[in-house]
Image (tube, rainbow, N blue to C red):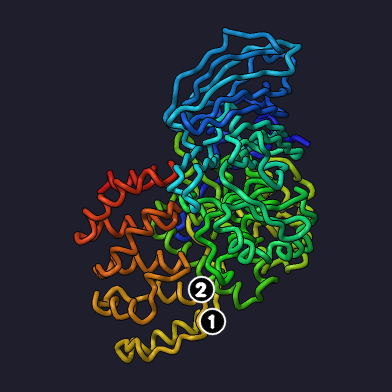
Amino acid sequence: MFKYLAPTLLSSLFLFHSCMESSDKKDETSIVIADNIDQHTHAKPDEAKVTHLNWRAQIDFEEKKIVAETKWKIEKDSLADSIIFDIHNLKINSVRVGGIERRDYYLGAADPILGQPLVIFIDSSTQWVAISYETNDGADALQWLDPQQTKGKSHPFLYTQSQAILARTWLPCQDSPGIKFTYTASVSVPNDLMAVMSATNGVGKNEKGNYQFAMKQPIPSYLMALAVGNLEFRKMSDRTGVYAEPEVIEAAVLEFEETDEMMKIAESFFGPYQWERYDILVLPPSFPFGGMENPRLTFVTPTIIAGDKSLTALIAHELAHSWSGNLVTNATWNDFWLNEGFTVYLERRIMDSLRGSDFNDMLAVLGYQDLEYDLARLPKEETSLYLDLAGRNPDDGMTDIAYEKGALFLTYLEENVGRKNMDQFLTDYFKQNSFSSITTANFLEQLDTIMFKGDSNRMKKLRIDRWVYRAGLPGEHIEPTSSEIQYVRSTMKAWSDKAFSFDELETSDWNALQWIDFLRRLPDTLSAERYQRLDMIFKFSQSPNNEIKAIWFERSIQAGYIGVKDELKAFLMEVGRRKFLYPIYEAMLSNDEYNSLARSIYKDARKNYHSVSRKSIDQLMDKD
Ligand SMILES: [Zn+2]
């Protein structure tokens, strides 16, 4: 099941891309693929790698630390005399090799991004290596929430967020997406709390606070996940359910009730779901992302519960990762687009089938706007699908290039080969690469052999290399359109021709996505008074839809409308989703009226954010 492509095997696939075929000067930025080795791990899996983990852990809410042991089953080359793990800010208590304590392990120099290598000596008979350790205050994957930071305000909460390279901050591991392992876990928590993991989960609390888990399918370390809190479970169908605090569980079940249908749609296109169950864990609002595709148990932000299912494309997205990302994984973070570009494409296909093409076209248009924004914002060399992130934090590659340019590329492929061939290719691709990790070069080779039957002329004709290895967007891309969004735009134009008399707007049949487009396109020239008038009529500051609310805050700040201050402060104190925080703080810092308010809110709110969000906002504050 475990397939790791050692660098030697890959050398024949190395590609060197120059700018030879480009005739367009603007497109000449092209990336050199140095190698296919994961530069973000200290591990040397071609010498010794892990295959199974037995994790025993005690979750200490008083001290806010995890005290645990990882017992790793390993597989190695006959000549290997050591195995290397990644750790970042962990306290190692002891190491046992084959049951015997060893004191001759050593820690290499600490790198601010990668942490340290933990080198353990082994011999030809070694099968197991056990490491006892505890986490430190600076464990970036962990967020410990006090009761007042949760919905119920009565119990503390802990959750992990390991992608991309934060698993090493809460367990010693070979922290590479190219190395997969199965796991079992035994976790002790205070007996009024429930623990869940990216594994088999129970349906209720147990009196002793001891929870057992098993993940039978191999996963990479970034999909290791744990959450502990006052959780309840509600079944949605035979294979789907929701875990959440009791205060949000009813709303969550209603919002996510289409999940089983989404699964059936995805299976009909892309082959069987391989993880048995698909449950959703609703986290407190500090969660830094929209969702995290932890296998069997997607972690989601509560900010997608809008009451009208308008934001549940995110569930389709996380579910789609059960194929692209979790089943077939990017081998290195340079290949991140293989995870996200495919997933956005799959997400749209699911939503197209579930909600119809009108809804899906709106998603595609909004996604294209995101892409245009990132293309304008990012340095040219960061706008190719394949990236060279050596020496950098892999989080730097988490832009809409991977997501939206990746999806646009696959949509372009579909346009050229037909939907039937595309689905057949994807089904074969997921089957052939199940539970393994692949590079961009591997993907292109399979596209050539499976889709184009080795007819390289077709690859050339479609200029596949240009899509993958070059900056920007190839001229032949198809810009998505949507009649519903077009309707918003023509209505806006009519209003602007009439100098915006908002009271006359007929918007009763507009949906959330149309409103998002409307807010994104409000002219910069609109005065603060007019923003106030808009807010009075449409009550954006009080919208139950957090996407609408967040854009509204950003635009209001840019317009200098200060009437949103109270709602804005409440939002920033509670919500930790980086996608919302970053543009809002950025807008506040560049507006004199809001600059000092941004700093004082952040001073109080910072503790409510996960390290992923804190890092980004810290940088913004320093930059200003
Ligand atoms: Zn994703």
> Does any portion of residue 453 appear in the rendered image?
no
Q: Secondary structure at mark 2?
A: helix
Residue count near mark 1 (Cα–Cα under 10 Å), binned few <14, some 14–19, many ≥20: some
Q: Earlier in the sequence, mark 2 or mark 1?
A: 1
Q: Position of residue 393 (x, y in %)?
A: 46, 39
Location of the N terminus by quadrant is: top right
Q: Which residue was labeled with disc 1?
A: 484
Residue count near mark 2 (Cα–Cα under 10 Å), binned few <14, some 14–19, many ≥20: many
Q: Is residue 58 above or below residue 603?
A: above
Q: Is residue 506 above or below residue 620?
A: below
Viewer-closest of 347 and 448? 347
Would you say 573 lies left or right of 407 here?
left
Asked if labels 1 and 2 touch by Cβ distance under 8 angstroms, the answer is yes
At label 1, which amino acid type do we have?
Answer: Glu
Q: Position of residue 232 (x, y in %)?
A: 63, 51
Q: Which residue was labeled with disc 2?
A: 513
